[in-house]
């Protein structure tokens, strides 16, 4: 299990243990993290799982794909550290990672 901390826009935090191989969107939905909608079910087709990855973790999660960049064009408040949670797969190297949620997904 890998501990990931989700920080909501209002500052509230939820640390959850996720199984290796699930993506951050699946983990958020399964743990009722408010603010992650995942309307497309993780197909990188909606941008409703937009998150901000803390800078220290960006090298470990790797760069955005072209498809992810395309979907983020539909998201609000996109930053350099914006990612789609459905595109980040949990693995041991991500233990302790912190991600932040935007004010809204729509």
Image (cartoon, helix red, strand yellow):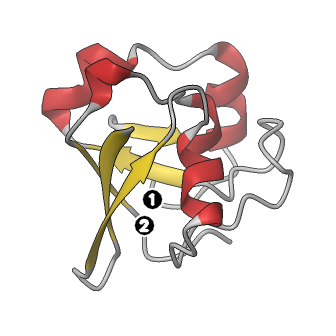
Nearer to us in this view, 2 or 32: 2
Left/right of residue 75 with respect to residue 6 in the rendered view: right
Residue where numbered disc 1 is placed: 77
At a point 39% along the width and 38% down the height, the residue shown is 1
Can you give x and y, in whole percent of width and height, for residue 72 in the image?
62, 41
Question: Tag on residue 20?
Answer: none
Which structural element holds mark 1? loop
Q: Residue at x 61, y 68 (%)?
A: 105
Up-down relation of residue 106 to residue 68 (above or below): below
Give the residue pinned by disc 2.
Answer: 102
Residue at 44 percent across and 76 percent down: it is 103
Q: Residue furthest left?
A: 56
The relative height of residue 40 versus residue 86 in the rendered view (above or below) is below
Labels 2 and 1 touching (C-beta < 8 A): yes
- Identify the residue shown where x is 30% and y is 28%: 94
Query: Horizontal placement of 37 versus 80: left or right?
Result: right
Q: Position of residue 78 (x, y in %)?
A: 45, 49
Which quadrant would the C terminus be assigned to in this image?
bottom right
The residue closer to the viewer here, 17 or 9, is 17
The relative height of residue 71 versus residue 98 in the rendered view (above or below) is above
The answer for how far apart the CA atoms under marks 2 and 1 are is 7 Å
Label 2 or label 1, whichever comes before in sequence order: 1
Q: Position of residue 76 (x, y in %)?
A: 55, 61
- Say what secondary structure mark 2 lies in: loop
Q: Quadrant of residue 102?
A: bottom left
Q: Quadrant of residue 104?
A: bottom right
């Amino acid at each position: 299990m890998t501990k990931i901390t989700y920080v909501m826009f209002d500052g509230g935090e939820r640390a959850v243990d996720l199984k290796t191989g699930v993506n951050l969107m699946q983990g958020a939905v399964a743990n009722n993290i408010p603010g992650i909608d995942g309307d497309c079910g993780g197909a990188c087709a909606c941008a409703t799982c937009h998150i901000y990855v803390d800078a220290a973790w960006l090298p470990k999660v790797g760069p955005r794909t072209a498809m992810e960049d395309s979907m983020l064009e539909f998201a609000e408040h996109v930053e350099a550290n914006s990612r789609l949670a459905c595109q980040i797969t949990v693995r041991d190297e991500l233990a302790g990672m912190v991600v932040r949620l935007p004010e809204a997904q729509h």
